[in-house]
Image: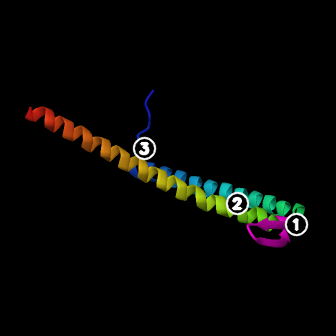
Amino acid sequence: MRRKNKEPSDVQEIVANAKKLTRERGFRIGLVTGALITVAIAIFIIQNAERTDLEYLWLDFSMPLWIGLLAAFAAGSLAGPLFLSTWRRHRRAKQERRAAEHAIKEAEKNLS
């Protein structure tokens, strides 16, 4: 059984159509995901709309619970990457220090 050879333009057209369908599908998935997240946030805000008293250090204030939770989430979202970048920098410096110590030991051994 022989296969019909496809023209290069046919193959390019198939690839172009597949890419277009993939982009459209990705857009739809992103749109649906965004809508679901928006609904979830709206439900969260409605369920946590009551005011609550908060104390932080010497500050006493009252605000809707959802704003306090959002502020705590934002602070954690900012602190995480800062901690991670500091840890990575420390780890990289430690690796470089060990490599330098190893190179010094090798050089001393070669001199002996």
Q: Amino acid at mark 3?
A: Lys
Residue that label 2 marks: 73
Residue 10 x %, y %: 45, 50
Q: Is residue 64 magenta?
A: yes
Question: Which label's residue is closer to the chain start, 3 or 1?
Answer: 3
Q: Quadrant of the C terminus?
A: top left
Q: Which residues are magenta?
A: 49-65
Q: Say whether marks 3 and 1 touch (CB < 8 Å).
A: no
User: Which residue lies under the disc numbered 1?
Assistant: 52
* Residue 1, magenta (yes or no): no
Instruction: Answer whether labels 2 and 1 touch (C-beta < 8 Å).
Output: no
Q: Is residue 74 left or right of residue 111?
A: right
Q: Residue furthest front?
A: 58
Figure check: 55 above or below 40 = below
- Secondary structure of the residue carrying tag 1 is strand
- Element under disc 3: loop
* Percent position of residue 90, x then y: 42, 51
**Residue 107, placed above or below residue 38:** above
Q: Is residue 4 visible?
A: yes
Specify the quadrant that holds the N terminus: top left
Camera-near label (3 vs 2) is 2
Residue 6 - label: 3
Q: Amino acid at mark 1?
A: Thr
Question: What amino acid is labelled 2 in the image?
Answer: Phe
